[in-house]
Amino acid sequence: MKNLKKFLAVLLVAAMVTGFSGNVCRAKTKSDVYGDLIKQLKKKEQFADGVYTAKIHDASGNDILLVTDAVCKVEGKNAVWADVYQNVNGKAELITTIVSTGSGYPICKKGNYILSGFHHKSMRYKITSDSTIMEQINGLYLNKKYCTYTKNKIKDGKMTQLKRKKVKAKTAEKMDYYVDRKGNMRGKPIKFSRK
């Protein structure tokens, strides 16, 4: 009898920890931060024709949400601009806006980076749980002797320049984050869906 009571107690605890079939004893889930944001955005005139989103992981492994009001078709539904939101203490917080040029240059992802190309400029963003590092090369493919490399940190809505230097144009073209010397995109276009 004693063993049966122990067995039943262990079984009951295990069921409470793992959850019964159904929702009994399961921990309450956090509110859908991004779902609430999308509902708010749909009320704005800018998004009257629809909200397009893409949920990807940042460099820390957390979900971030990219939001735009328009997409183009390159490889699926891609965007040339997007606001980037991050869950900060249970609230969707706008951390940056990423812009890429024209329908031929959608926002891409490669590893831990989001990539964009913009009028002789190549940018990559590394978003973590506490800040964003944005690196850019300006002046690409203009037949100049030098380009400019900058590295900025975005934290709490403020951007701080960490580094700025001249780079030989040939070196800068090899560093181009967005396309290689043959014009091939280095990343994979991020696919957006309508909400």
Image (cartoon, rainbow, N blue to C red):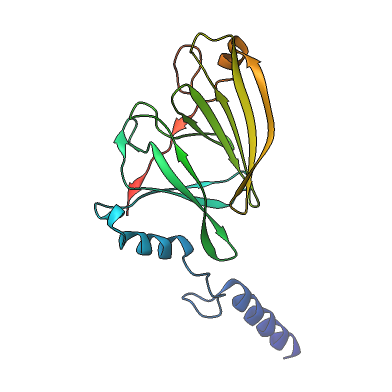
From the viewer's perspective, is 98 left or right of 2?
A: left
Write the residue at 56% across / 74% down.
19
From the viewer's perspective, is 17 left or right of 84?
A: right
- Tell me if residue 171 can be seen: yes
Marker count (numbered): 0
Q: Position of residue 24 (x, y in %)?
A: 51, 80
From the viewer's perspective, is 107 left or right of 131?
A: left
Write the residue at 37% across / 64% down.
40
Write the residue at 57% across / 46% down.
58
- Tell me if residue 178 can be seen: no
Write the residue at 42% across / 44% down.
82
* Image height of 3 relative to 128, above or below: below
Q: Quadrant of residue 162?
A: top right
From the viewer's perspective, is 132 left or right of 141?
A: right
In this view, the residue in front, 141 or 53, is: 141
Q: Residue furthest right?
A: 2
Q: Residue furthest left?
A: 49
Q: Position of residue 77 (x, y in %)?
A: 32, 38
Considering the image in quadrants, where does the C terminus appear? bottom left
Q: Quadrant of residue 34?
A: bottom left
Q: Position of residue 85 (x, y in %)?
A: 50, 53
* Image height of 148 relative to 73, above or below: above
Q: Position of residue 151 (x, y in %)?
A: 65, 33
In this view, the residue in front, 23 or 75, is: 75
Considering the image in quadrants, where does the N terminus appear? bottom right
* Image height of 95 relative to 117, above or below: below
